[in-house]
Image (cartoon, grey):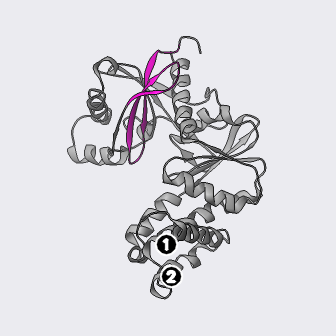
């Protein structure tokens, strides 16, 4: 890629998390990294409570303070930020781009913002057919170069995305609130006393797959209370119930993929990588599944950020 920066800063700013990575322009390797739990939602609440200044200045001040924590030689590199930073509760709202989009990302919307001698390229989201996303489109853009066949790209998360991929372009997508629903049920429902996170051993694995099998029937509402029954009547331990509930929700989310055309691509990291892999193995019945490693997923985001930075000078 001609005229690419020797180094740049990749900023992934989501609803609940914030991450800065200094990236080498040639290898896309991470040189240094900074994380915090101050996502867009928390900073928006802090801004509203403060009643001070402009929204952009408030968020820019937080971002600058994080950049100041990086080693001195990296603090003023160009920054590319995707995720919720360009939303209505972020630092500056940008309009949604329209489908389709591909690996080049030329249809995505970006805007340079100046903040105290620093340059920030803010990336907007995408509007679909009755759906929206911010952040996932950049991840998908970077992964498109790894996708050789038509199919569906699965991006698990709080609000999981399923993106339809046809002839080198993402043409449609749907959002599944699997992660948020799991969190609500575990913390704020009658099921909360019946579940507890624990090690993922053989018994938990079996409980998870049982949940996947139940979830694929499409009877989610009438199956949820089985978590409570499993503890009260069946004396199932909370850790097994925890993974049964996870399998139930993931199985319900993925059940339609058994009828999908083409390859199913999975891009996940952390514990969800193993859970979604197991669920797809259970559901696809020999269907074509390609699972991206966590390293490929990380490099995809860096590649997309580098591409957008190059496009916008």
The percent coordinates of residue 206 (x first, y second) are 58, 70
Q: Residue furthest top?
A: 3
Q: Residue at x 43, y 63 (%)?
A: 183
In the rendered image, residue 129, in percent from the top left (x then y), is placed at 64, 48
The quadrant of the image that shows the N terminus is top right
Q: In the figure, residue 276 lies in which quadrant? A: bottom right
Q: Is residue 230 above or below residue 265?
A: below
At horizontal 36% and vertical 48% (from top left) the residue drawn is 41
- Residue 6 visible in the shown view: yes
Q: Is the residue marked by circle 1 packed among few (<14), some (14-19), or many (20+) residues within 10 Å?
A: many
Badge 2 element: helix
Q: Which residue is mark 1?
A: 240
Question: Which residues lie in the magenta part?
Answer: 4-32
Dot label at residue 147: none
As helix, strand or loop, the secondary structure at mark 1 comes to helix
Is 206 left, or right, of 36 in this rendering? right
Spot the residue most to the bottom: 233
Cβ atoms under marks 1 and 2 closer than 8 Å? yes
Judging by the rendered image, the residue that carries numbered circle 2 is 230
**Closer to us: 56 or 276:** 276
Instruction: Give residue 10's quadrant in the image.
Output: top left
In the rendered view, tell whether residue 92 sits above or below residue 270. above
């Amino acid at each position: 890629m001609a005229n690419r920066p020797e180094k740049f800063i990749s900023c992934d700013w989501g609803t609940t998390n914030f991450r800065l990575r200094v990236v080498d322009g040639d290898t896309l390797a991470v040189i240094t990294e900074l994380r915090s739990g101050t996502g867009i939602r928390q900073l928006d609440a802090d801004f509203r409570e403060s009643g001070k200044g402009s929204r952009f200045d408030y968020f820019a001040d937080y971002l600058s303070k994080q950049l100041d924590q990086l080693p001195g030689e990296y603090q003023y590199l160009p920054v590319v930020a995707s995720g919720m930073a360009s939303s209505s509760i972020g630092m500056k709202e940008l309009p949604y781009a329209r489908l389709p989009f591909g690996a080049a990302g030329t249809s995505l919307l970006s805007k340079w913002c100046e903040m105290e001698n620093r340059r920030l390229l803010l990336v907007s989201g995408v509007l679909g057919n009755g759906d929206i996303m911010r952040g996932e489109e950049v991840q998908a853009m970077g992964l498109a170069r790894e996708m050789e066949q038509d199919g569906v790209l699965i991006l698990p998360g709080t609000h999981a995305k399923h993106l339809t991929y046809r002839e080198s372009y993402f043409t449609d997508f749907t959002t599944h609130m699997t992660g948020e629903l799991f969190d609500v049920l575990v913390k704020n429902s009658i099921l909360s006393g019946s579940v507890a996170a624990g090690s993922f051993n053989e018994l938990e694995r079996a409980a998870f797959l049982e949940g996947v099998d139940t979830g694929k029937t499409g009877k989610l509402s009438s199956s949820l209370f089985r978590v409570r029954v499993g503890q009260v009547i069946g004396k199932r331990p909370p850790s097994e119930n925890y993974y049964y509930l996870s399998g139930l929700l993931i199985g319900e989310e993925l059940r339609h993929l058994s009828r999908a055309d083409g390859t199913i691509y999975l891009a996940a990291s952390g514990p969800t990588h193993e859970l979604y892999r197991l669920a797809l193995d259970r559901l696809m019945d020999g269907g074509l599944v390609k699972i991206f490693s966590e390293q490929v997923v990380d490099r995809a985001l860096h590649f997309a950020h580098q591409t957008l930075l190059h496009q916008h000078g």
